[in-house]
Amino acid sequence: MPQIILIILSVVIVAVLVSKRGRESAVGICATALDRFDKLTTSQTVRKNANKEKILELLQVQSELSNNDIRDALKVSERTVVNYMDELEQEGRVVQDGSTGRGVVYRLR
């Protein structure tokens, strides 16, 4: 009888140790995924800020730009241009002339 109890206790101890190692490796995998996500978002932020600076440089050369002008210059989607311009407007760096559609142009503030 004491041998059976000892065997059961040994199995339980091994199971606990294995499960802890499994959790640690899962935490390691999650940490790796979070690191990659941070690098990706940092890369996207750098690219976005560079594109916004390019827009401002273009506006210094030309007095006004449309969404299509910016899209063609940066090779990005229409929605991306709208997002960039919304941010530049909120930052107080550009002003939008026109409310919607093809008549919208942007100028430096």
Image: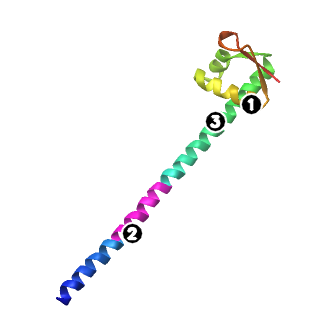
**Alpha carbon separation for disc pair 1 and 3:** 19 Å
Left or right of residue 5: residue 51: right
- State the residue at coordinates (67%, 16%): 69
Instruction: Pick the residue in front: 31 or 74.
Output: 31
Q: Can you say which quadrant of the picture contains the C terminus?
A: top right
* Residue 97 horizontal/vertical position (percent): 76, 15
Tell me which segment is drawn in magenta: 18-31
Sequence-first tag of 3 and 2: 2
Secondary structure beneath dot 2 equals helix
Q: In the rendering, which numbered label is found on residue 20? A: 2
Kindly give the residue lying farthest to the left in the view shown. Answer: 1
Q: Residue tagged by mark 3? A: 47
Left or right of residue 21: residue 91: right
Sequence-first tag of 2 and 1: 2
Left or right of residue 103: residue 80: left
Q: Residue tagged by mark 1? A: 90
Question: Where 42 falls versus 55 (above or below)?
Answer: below
Identified by mark 3, the residue type is Arg
Is label 3 in contact with label 2 (beta carbons under 8 Å)?
no
- State the residue at coordinates (65%, 39%): 46
